[in-house]
């Protein structure tokens, strides 16, 4: 990615749509993301060295989707590493979510718990196999 900075905006759009669909938020009628970084945010992403390559960018965009409270994603949802230090490609989940507010993580866990409970409570009479989980 260091040699193909021009691909970053397209990758960001792709990851925005992927994680907006996964989180069921900020989607238009066609199921595409309506999120975008503020111009300074995209510039920071374009200037970042990306030692973790595409996976690190994907993690940054996923984090932005989870933390987004408005279609225009502010700078403060970007990991500090994008503005300076780098997150290693093999970073643990703890390192990735270290800056995520606990209330946001709790909301995500509650939503997932509800989806799991709904899935488990499906009527499976007649020896039906389990359907694909909705998460």
Image (cartoon, helix red, strand yellow):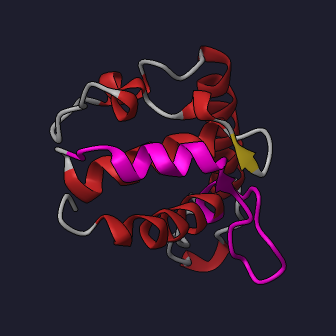
Q: Quadrant of the N terminus?
A: bottom left
**Looking at the rendering, which quadrant does residue 49 occupy?**
top left
Q: In the rendering, at what x and y percent does residue 131 appear?
A: 55, 73
What residue is rendered at 45% in x and 42% in y? 44
- Residue pictured at 65% horizontal, 57% vertical: 119
Q: Nearer the viewer, residue 128 or 63?
A: 63
Is residue 36 covered in magenta? Answer: yes
Residue 93 shown in magenta: no
Span shown in magenta: 21-50
Q: Visible in this render: residue 38?
A: yes
Residue closest to the eye, 18 or 117: 18
User: In the image, is 132 to the left or to the right of 121?
Assistant: left
Residue at 65% x, 26% y is: 104
Does residue 134 show up?
no
Residue with the most extreme right position: 29
Between residues 1 and 52, which one lies in front from this camera angle? Answer: 1
Percent position of residue 21, x then y: 64, 65
Depth check: 78 or 24 in front?
A: 78
Tell whether 132 sits left or right of 111.
Answer: left
The vertical placement of 3 against 119, above or below, is below
Residue 130 at what x, y percent from top left? 52, 69
Query: Looking at the image, how many numbered discs can be counted on the residues?
Result: 0
Task: Judge from the rendering whether residue 81 lies leftward or rightward of residue 2; answer left or right.
Answer: right
């Amino acid at each position: 990615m260091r040699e193909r900075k021009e691909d970053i905006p397209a990758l960001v759009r792709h990851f925005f749509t992927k994680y907006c669909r996964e989180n069921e938020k900020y989607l238009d009628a066609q199921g595409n993301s309506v999120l975008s970084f503020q111009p300074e945010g995209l510039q920071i992403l374009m200037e970042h060295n990306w030692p973790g390559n595409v996976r690190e960018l994907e993690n940054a965009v996923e984090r932005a989707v989870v933390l987004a409270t408005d279609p225009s994603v502010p700078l403060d949802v970007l990991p500090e590493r994008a503005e300076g230090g780098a997150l290693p490609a093999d970073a643990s989940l703890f390192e990735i979510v270290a800056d995520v507010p606990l209330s946001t993580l709790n909301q995500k866990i509650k939503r997932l718990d509800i989806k799991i409970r709904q899935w488990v409570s499906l009527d499976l009479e007649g020896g039906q196999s389990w359907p694909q989980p909705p998460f």
